[in-house]
């Protein structure tokens, strides 16, 4: 692949061969380019190119040279600028990055600039803020619509908020990561803001609240790892807000949601003490992702009445309480994924209690369970073959696809699989993966094309899981159901009899 080189004027030269080709074309009989398309069409085509390809095209074609200085989407990362990623030369990489971006922006006409996205490289220091402030001023004063500034760590960079009012109301998307953001009382620039994403940003709760209450056009709000926020209110006046994500804010104790038209909600909390208060509008939510300890219990016990229209549910938890059978329902839920992955999941958890969801979700069509763990401490049905539990009175008429990853010989997990096989009358596919995700063995690890070695305990449990499937599950699988069992490859991990 030809590596581009950024020139002092902000253009890109590709290689000696390409330069000679350009020079030859320029000198050949004084001929001039005769573009068969208008300048506006060339510029439109140019705007869809990756920034590195756009620079190359500008080097090779006069038709693209002018539009290069009016390129609307400026995305600057180590990759787009061709910086070599060598951690032993972080200062050199950062220096090259700032120099190249500075040249490009200083030579950009400012005409048609729509998006500026900067992923600051490792090696940022306080003195580099002069570059960032100048770049932001160039973009904001030219009416930027999308602004993204990402740092690789919690940098001591204070975003120059005073620049934002200069944009008028042009900004539609603002994404900040790992910096400080202290908004003042001037919020006119928020008039057309549709997306706000703050990831690892130092911002106080009252400052964020003033922003949110002023961004009436907001459609998407993402708040992640903002550890200074104690209370967050999402007001009912945000009529256009459809997507909300609040994830792992350490000090968050109260999340109050009243926006009426949210359809997708992703919620992860660091402390179980975080109080979630939701208004009537939450009943419109169709997609929910919950990530915290005891999330399965919380979603099954406390949320059904508030999220009656839920269709897709994803739950991640590393610690769980057993799930009770309750009369509450998710009448429209079609897709359910539960991840209980952990190094060792508590042996007190009863996998069979998850059958409560089947009773609560009469429209369920697909169920996925991740039960990966390095050491399985549940009672194995192989060592303790007790009578299996079941609820034969239950019937699930729409469940078609079931997949269990990290399947073990845990008695309660085998009971759950048997329950599905017997009670899901429309079941078409049942996939059981019996080895752990951390030890997938389909990638060759050496010159002999063999897999990496697996821990003995993982291999032994895979064998027990296979035996449990053959003994308890295969005999009751209807002929109309496709049973697929996936385990460590026998060529590399065969166990001696």
Image: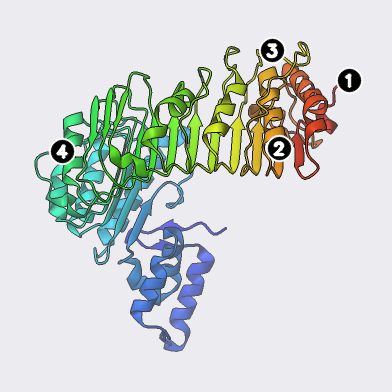
The percent position of residue 404, horizontal first and vertical second, equals: 65, 32
Whether pointer 4 and pointer 3 mark residues with C-beta atoms closer than 8 Å, the reply is no
- Marks 4 and 2, how far apart in space? 49 Å
First in sequence, mark 4 or 2: give its number: 4
In this rendering, is residue 320 above or below 486?
A: above
298 vs 46, nearest the viewer: 298
- Marks 1 and 3, how far apart in space? 24 Å
Left or right: residue 109 versus residue 377 is left
- The answer to whether one can see residue 295 in this image is yes
| Label 3 packing within 10 angstroms: few (<14), some (14-19), many (20+) | some
439 vs 219, nearest the viewer: 219
Which residue was labeled with disc 3?
379
The image's mark for residue 210 is 4
130 vs 169, nearest the viewer: 169
First in sequence, mark 3 or 2: give its number: 3
In this rendering, is residue 461 above or below 240?
A: above
Residue for point 38% across, 26% down: 269
Left or right: residue 168 versus residue 359 is left
SS for callout 3: loop
């Amino acid at each position: 692949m030809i590596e581009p080189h950024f020139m002092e004027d902000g253009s890109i030269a590709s290689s000696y061969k390409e330069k000679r080709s350009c020079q030859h074309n320029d000198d050949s009989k004084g001929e001039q380019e005769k573009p068969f398309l208008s300048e506006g069409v060339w510029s439109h085509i140019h705007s869809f190119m990756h920034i590195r390809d756009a620079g190359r095209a500008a080097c090779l074609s006069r038709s693209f040279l002018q539009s290069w200085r009016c390129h609307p989407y400026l995305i600057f990362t180590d990759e787009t600028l061709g910086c070599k990623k060598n951690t032993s030369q972080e200062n050199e990489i950062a220096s090259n990055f700032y120099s190249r971006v500075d040249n490009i922006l200083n030579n950009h006409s400012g005409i048609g600039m729509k998006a500026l996205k900067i992923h600051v490289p490792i090696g940022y220091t306080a003195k580099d803020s002069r570059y960032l402030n100048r770049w932001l001023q160039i973009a904001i004063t030219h009416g930027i619509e999308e602004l993204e500034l990402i740092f690789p760590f919690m940098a001591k960079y204070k975003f120059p908020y005073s620049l934002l009012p200069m944009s008028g109301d042009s900004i539609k998307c603002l994404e900040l990561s790992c910096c400080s953001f202290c908004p003042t009382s001037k919020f006119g620039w928020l008039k057309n803001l549709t997306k706000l994403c703050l990831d690892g940003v130092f911002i106080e709760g009252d400052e964020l609240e003033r922003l949110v209450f002023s961004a009436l056009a907001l459609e998407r709000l993402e708040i992640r790892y903002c550890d200074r926020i104690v209370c967050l209110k999402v007001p009912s006046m945000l009529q256009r807000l459809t997507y909300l994500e609040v994830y792992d804010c350490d000090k968050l104790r109260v999340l109050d949601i009243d926006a009426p038209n949210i359809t997708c909600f992703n919620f992860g909390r660091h402390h179980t003490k975080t109080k979630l208060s939701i208004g009537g509008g939450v009943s419109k939510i169709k997609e929910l992702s919950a990530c915290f300890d005891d999330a399965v219990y919380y979603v099954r016990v406390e949320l059904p009445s508030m999220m009656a229209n839920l269709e897709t549910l994803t739950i991640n938890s590393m610690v769980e309480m057993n799930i009770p059978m309750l009369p509450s329902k998710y009448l429209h839920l079609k897709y359910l994924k539960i991840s209980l992955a952990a190094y060792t999941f508590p042996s007190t958890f009863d996998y069979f209690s998850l059958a409560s969801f089947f009773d609560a979700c009469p429209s369920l069509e697909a169920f996925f369970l991740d039960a990966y763990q390095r050491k399985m401490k549940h009672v194995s049905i192989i060592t303790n073959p007790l009578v299996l539990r079941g609820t034969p009175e239950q019937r699930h008429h729409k469940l078609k696809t079931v997949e269990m990853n990290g399947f073990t010989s845990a008695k309660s997990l085998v009971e759950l699989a048997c329950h599905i096989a017997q009670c899901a009358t429309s079941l078409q596919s049942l996939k059981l993966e019996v080895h752990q995700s951390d030890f997938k063995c389909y990638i060759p690890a050496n010159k002999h094309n063999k897999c990496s070695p697996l821990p003995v305990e993982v291999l032994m449990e895979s064998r027990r899981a296979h035996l449990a499937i053959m003994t308890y599950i295969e005999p009751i699988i209807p002929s109309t159901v496709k049973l697929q069992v996936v385990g460590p490859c026998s060529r590399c991990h065969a166990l001696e009899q």
